[in-house]
Amino acid sequence: MSQTSSAGSFAELGLPPAMLANLTQLGYLTMTPIQAAGLPPALAGHDLIAQAKTGSGKTAAFGLALLARLNAKRFAVQAMVLCPTRELADQVTQEIRRLGRFEDNIKVLSLVGGSTLRN
């Protein structure tokens, strides 16, 4: 998934070099508008409410801030993302796992409720 726009560079955010290298490898070259607006306050530890269309980069916007605030040396649950559907939970899990692969000790787990639909 390549993310491009004229909203700015991820390097401007002071992210760790390994995270920036991973973003480049994933094709995240510049921030989308939602990322440019949301990442700076989220990285500063502020609460954020944002809305944008599907495919605009929202998961990366909150996922990068979440990952930047983790302490990979601490083996405990440090973050939780709630999603309204199983499908969205799977998508968010996969994307945060991709975004977090720069750090060896980050584990992303999806826990979903309900019953499995069977034909």
Image (cartoon, rainbow, N blue to C red):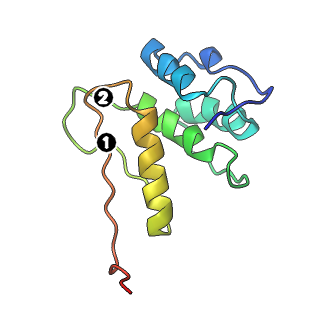
**Along the line of sight, the residue nearer the viewer: 2 or 9:** 2
Percent coordinates x, y for residue 24 in the rendering: 56, 20
Residue 107 rendering spot, x and y as whole percentages: 28, 40
Mark seen at residue 38 = none
Which amino acid is tagged 2? Asn
Instruction: Establish if 117 lies above or below 1.
Output: below
x and y, in percent, of residue 69 in the image = 41, 31
Coordinates of residue 45 in the picture (x, y in percent): 51, 34
User: Residue 118 falls in which quadrant of the image?
Assistant: bottom left
C-alpha distance separating marks 2 and 1: 8 Å
| Dot 1 amino acid type | Gln
Horizontal side of residue 88 vs 11, given as left or right: left
Q: Is residue 17 above or below residue 36?
A: above
The residue nearer to you, when weighing 67 against 114, is 114
Give whichever of 46, 52 is nearer the camera.
52
Disc on res. 78:
1
The residue carrying pointer 1 sits among few (fewer than 14), some (14 to 19) or many (20 or more) residues within 10 Å by Cα, namely few
Determine whether, in the image, residue 109 is placed left or right of residue 20.
left
CB atoms at circles 2 and 1 under 8 Å apart?
Answer: yes
Residue 19 makes an appearance in the image? yes
Residue drawn at (50%, 40%), measured in percent from left and top?
Answer: 63
Residue placed under numbered mark 2 in the picture: 71
Instruction: Please identify the residue farthest to the bottom as the structure is shown.
Output: 119
Name the residue located 27 percent from the left edge and 26 percent from the top edge.
104
Decide if residue 83 is in sight here.
Answer: no
Q: Quadrant of residue 103?
A: top left
Name of the residue lying farthest toward the right: 6
Vertical position of residue 44 compared to residue 34: above or below: above
| Quadrant the C terminus occupies | bottom left
